[in-house]
Image (tube, rainbow, N blue to C red):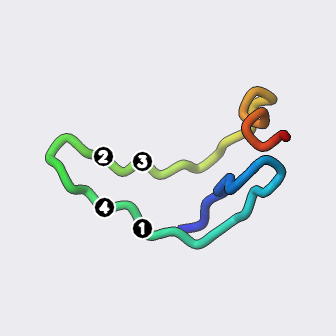
Amino acid sequence: MRGAVIHAPGDVRFETLDDPKISRPTDAIIRTVATCVCGSDLWPSRS
C-alpha cells in the first residue's frame, strides 16, 4: 500500500507501507476510491 507520510515540516514522502490487518473483531478495512486534500490538512507540512 502507498501512503503519504509527513516526516517533518516540508518533508512529505510517498512510501510503501504494510497492508492493514484486522486485529480485533471491531476493526474494519475501508477501501478509498476517491479523496481530496483540504487546505487545513496542509498545515502540519508547513514550517
Mark 4, secondary structure of its residue: loop
Q: Report the disc number at residue 30.
A: 3
Q: Do the residues labelled 2 and 3 touch (CB within 8 Å)?
A: yes
Contact between marks 4 and 1 (CB within 8 A): the answer is: yes
Label 4 and label 1: CA atoms lie apart by 6 Å
The C terminus - image quarter? top right
Q: Is residue 33 placed above or below 19 in the rendered structure?
A: above
Near mark 2 (Cα within 10 A), the count class, few <14, some 14-19 or many ≥20, is: few
- Quadrant location of residue 19? bottom left
**Residue at mark 2:** 28
Q: Is residue 33 left or right of residue 12?
A: left
Q: Label 4 belongs to which residue?
A: 21
Helix, strand or loop for disc 3: loop
Q: Which of marks 2 and 1 is nearer the N terminus?
A: 1
Q: Position of residue 17 (x, y in %)?
A: 52, 68
Which element type, helix, strand or loop, lies under badge 1? loop
Labelled disc at residue 19: 1
**CA gap, disc 2 to disc 3?**
6 Å
Point out residue 29 in the picture as x, y percentages from the top left corner: 36, 51
Contact (CB < 8 A) between labels 3 and 4? no
Outermost residue on the top side: it is 40
Q: Nearer the viewer, mark 1 or mark 3?
A: 1
